[in-house]
Image (cartoon, rainbow, N blue to C red):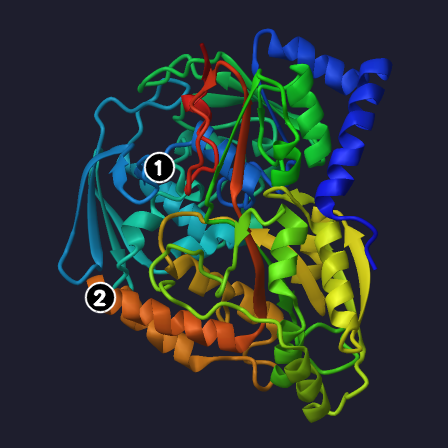
Amino acid sequence: MLAMSIGTFLKSNLSALAICAATLASPSVAGSAQAAEGALVVARNMDINSLDPARAFCDTCQIYLSAVYETLLTLGDDNKTLVPKLATAWSANADQTEFTFDLSPNAVFADGSPVTSADVAWSLQRLKNIKGDPSFLMDSVASIDTPSAKKVVISTKEPNSEFLGILAASYAGILNKRLAEANGASAGEDAATVDTADNWFFANSAGSGPYTLSSYRADDELRFAANPNYWGTKPAMPEVIIKQTADAVAQAQMLESGAADVAMQIDPDTAASYSNAEIVISAVPSFNFLYLALSPAAKANTTPLTKPIRQAIAAAIDYSAMIDFTVGGKGKFQPAPIPNGFPGTMDLPEPKEDIAKAKALLAEAGVPDGFTIEAHYPAVNAYGVDISLMMQKVQQDLARIGVTLNLTPTTFAVWREEVSGDGIPLTAVYYAPDYFGSAQYVQYFAMIEGQPWGKRAGAGAVDGVANPKEAELLKEAMSSSGEKNEAAFRAIALEMIEDKVIIPLVSPDLVLAARKGVEGVRYSACCNLALDKLRRE
C-alpha cells in the first residue's frame, strides 16, 4: 500500500530540495540563473528523440519545431481556428481531396533565401517518406504539385476533412530544401534508408521560424537564438533556454529561486503550496492525457491478453482515486483515447471501476486466481504526473483481482526501442494533440492494421485484436462534415473504448506557472508553448 499521496510526497520534498539547492549551489541551477540574466529559461523534463521535423515526436519536440520551423497554417488562440502562417490563402475542393495554397511573398528562411513551393513539396514528401513517428500525418497525400514558386496544390488519395488541420501540426514544418539536402537529407521514396541528416539536425536548423537552434545537449539544455532574418513579427526574447529539469519539485524550486522563468510540469498539489507573490499560476483544462496500453502481441506475455482479460484490467482501475492520486483531483475522466472536447467525444460513457466484473472476466478467461504481467514504462513526469507513482497506483489496483504487475521504470529512449521491438505487455505513457482533430487519435490508437498501436498490439497478427469497423468509420468521418462527421467519430470512440487496448487514466488540468512579469504563457494544442509569444515586462 502506498504510504502517501503524490501531493504529500511532492510538498514534503519541495522545501528539502530548496534548502539543498541553496546550500550546495549546484552548477546546473547556478548556470541557469546566470543564463536567466539575458535569456528566458523554461524548466521542463525533455523527452526529445530527434530535432529533425520528420523524425521528432514528443511534447518538447512540438515546442522546438514550432519555434524554429513554420507550417503553412497554424492554430489561433482558441486552439480550434486555423490562421495563416507561410500560406496567406488556401482553399479546398468540394470533396476534400485537393487543397491549394498561396505562399507569402515575404517568407524567407533563416539564411535569407525565399520559402518556395519547392521547399514545401520537398518537406512534406520527406515527412511522408522518412517513415518516422509523425509520418502518419502525410499518409493520405497522393501528390504535391507546384504550378509556381508561390503556389502549392496537394491532392489526397481519399477525402480528408482534417487535412488543413494536419498541416497546422508542428511536424509539418517547412525546411530549407537546399540546406537540408546539402547535409544528408532526402525526400525520395527511399528516404527512410538513405537519409543521413538526423545527427546534423541535433546541431543545426533549417527553418524560417522566429528562432534558430543555438545548441542542444542531451539531458541538459536546448538553446534557441532569435532569427535575425525573421520575416514576421520579431520575437521579444533574444535567447530562450529549455533546461532539463526532471520533476515537478525541481521545476518548482527553479521557479522559486528565479533560475527559471517558466515551469511547464508543475503538478496541482505543488502549485497549491505556493505562497510566493512573484509566482503567477493558472490551471486550464487540457487536451493531454495519460494512458495504459496493452499489447497482446508482446513476446513477454505469459498469459494471452484476450479481450476478457483486457476488460478485466480496465474494470479493476479506480479511476476516481487515480485522478485524486495523480493530480489532486485537478483533472478529468478520459473515456476514450480522443481528448475531451474533440469531435466525437460529447457524452461518452465515463470509465468505471467494477471489481466484481473484473474477477468474473478473469474466471471466464480461465485465470480466476490472476496472473503476472510485465510493465515497462518511461520514468518521466508528464503534465504534472509522475508516471512511476501513477504505475504504483495501477499496481495496487490490479492486485485486488490477483494480477501481479512487475514494474520496470526505464528511460524514454529504451522504452521506445522496447515498444517498437519485441513489445511491452503493459505500458503507460502520454499523448498531446498534434492539431485540433480526432483523426490523429484514430490513426494512432485504433486497432487498424498498420497503424502504430494497432501494429504494436498485433492487429492482423493476433486473433481478436483488429477492429475493421474502425477503418470503415474513419473513411466516413474523413469524407463528411458537421453532424455526420461528429457522429462518425463518436462511433469510432465507442469502438476504441470497447477494444480495451488503450485505457486512458486521466486528463490532467494544465498548470501554467511563471515568474511575475513573464507574459505570453499559454497552452497551445499544436505547439504546446509558443516561445515567440514569451516576453518579460
Dot 1 or dot 2, earlier in sequence = 1
Image position, residue 197 (x, y; %) = 56, 38
Q: Position of residue 411 (x, y in %)?
A: 75, 47
Q: CA distance from mark 1 to mark 2?
A: 29 Å
Please indicate whether residue 99 sits to the left or right of residue 366 in the image.
left
* Residue at the spot of label 1: 71
Q: Position of residue 30 (x, y in %)?
A: 75, 13
The quarter of the rendered structure image containing the N terminus is bottom right
Q: Nearer the viewer, residue 115 or 384?
A: 384
Q: Quadrant of residue 111?
A: top left
Asked if residue 119 can be seen in this view, the reply is yes
Closer to the camera in the image, 351 or 524: 351
The image shows a total of numbered marks equal to 2
Q: Residue at x 65, y 59 (%)?
A: 321
Q: Residue at x 44, y 56 (%)?
A: 339
Check residue 142 in the rendering and tell me which mark sits there, or answer none: none
Residue sitting at x 81%, y 18%: 26
Q: Residues within 10 Å of mark 1 (few under 14, many from 20)?
A: many
Front residue of this view, candidates 419 and 203: 419
Mark 1 vs mark 2: give the one in front.
Answer: 2
- In this picture, is 456 found above or below 459? above
| Residue 217 visible in rendering | no
The structure residue drawn at horizontal position 76% and vertical position 82%, both measured from the top left corner, is: 303
Amino acid identity at mark 2: Glu
Against 519, residue 482 (above or below) is below
User: Residue 195's image quarter?
Assistant: top right
Neighbour tally class for label 2: few under 14, some 14-19, many 20 plus, Cα within 10 Å: few
Residue on which the image places disc 2 = 483
> Residue 161 at x, y = what percent?
26, 59
Going by the numbered disc 1, the residue's amino acid type is: Thr
